[in-house]
Image (cartoon, rainbow, N blue to C red):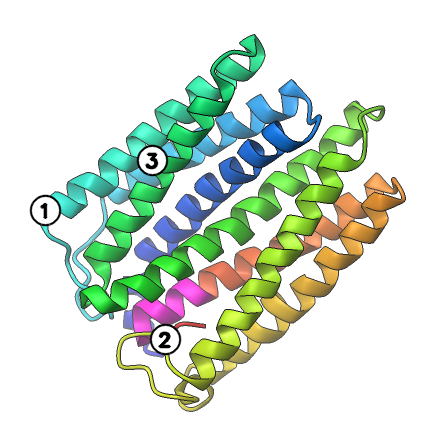
Amino acid sequence: MPAATIAQALPYANWILLVSLAVGSFALVAILGQATDATRGYLGFTAVCAAVLATIALIADLALPAPGGLTIVAPPAELDLARRIGLGVFAALAVAYALAVRRQQWRAPLAVLTLGAGAATLVAAAAGWAPTLVDSVPLLVQLCVLGAAAGGALAAVILGHWYLITPRISERPLVLATRLLTGVVALQLALFVVWTTLSGGPGQLAFEAFAGGPVLFVVLRLVVSLLFALVLSYMAIRTAQTRSMESATGLLYIDLAAILAGTIGAAALYLSAGLLV
């Protein structure tokens, strides 16, 4: 993979990472807020973190260079605007959700609206950057699962720390969070098999990912950020069920690092080589 291509892909990979962390972490907060007894402090703090990440992503979005030499294309002006508006609305609504959590008012409607803004952002990105409308569908799926994994791992790590300051809360929030994270990583593994053995990215051929220059990055994606992360996520479930919260948090830290590396790698492989993995 040429160094020049990697350099061109970095701003877009950075955008994908930031938005994945923002939207995915808020999605887990919204689920835990409705399905468990997660504390208001955790829900509000993580929602604000999602808003901060989305704001940073918006600032980075305004400085994105033209995607010359990459798989993606320059989007129409209206999709550029829609993507940026979606990010701004998401950040504002995430803050509103954090305030609603403290006041225990309008929490569910705000969660739905915030997730809707996040989804609109991803749709605008996929539709604008993909070379064709058909290619935008698998790209949107990839952006969604990257967000669910990276953001979910971040929100789970924050939750693990919350048990250190609020040890009396039940284990249900962390058990559910780790189960959802395990399911998402398993889904990513299934998509990896489908995309690499059949096809996925623009012009990607069957088993093309395992040939040529990027094969090392593809193998690392499989071993480190999918198989290894899947084992870590499952181990986190087991330790959370026994209320070994410090051990679960340590496992989730390693899991987060592996998933973030995979998120960056998967984004770079699509942007530079048109490979979905």
* CA separation in Å, label 2 and label 1: 26 Å
In the displayed structure, 133 sits above or below 46; it is below
The residue labelled by disc 1 is 77
Residue 16 in the image: x percent, y percent?
A: 38, 52
- Reading the chain from its start, which is encountered first: label 2 or label 1? 1
Front-most of 43 and 267?
Answer: 43
- Reading the chain from its start, which is encountered first: label 2 or label 3? 3
Q: Decide whether residue 274 is among the magenta residues.
A: yes
Q: Tag 3's secondary structure?
A: helix
The residue labelled by disc 3 is 117
The residue labelled by disc 2 is 200
Residue 119 appears in the figure: yes
Quadrant (top left, top right, bottom left, bottom right) of the N terminus: bottom left
Q: Say which amino acid is labelled 3.
A: Ala
Bounds of the magenta segment: 266-275
Q: Decide whether residue 242 is among the magenta residues.
A: no
User: Residue drawn 48% across and 56% down?
Assistant: 145
Pointer 1 and pointer 3: residues touching (CB < 8 Å)? no
* CA separation in Å, label 2 and label 3: 26 Å
Q: Say which amino acid is labelled 2.
A: Gly
Residue 72 in the image: x percent, y percent?
A: 23, 65
Of marks 1 and 3, the one in the foreground? 3
Front-most of 201 and 257?
Answer: 201
Q: Residues within 10 Å of mark 2 (few under 14, many from 20)?
A: many
Magenta-drawn stretch, dominant element (helix, strand or loop): helix
Residue 62 appears in the figure: no
Q: Tag 1's secondary structure?
A: helix
User: Residue drawn 44% across and 89% down?
Assistant: 207
Residue 144 falls left or right of residue 233: left
Q: Say which amino acid is labelled 1.
A: Ala
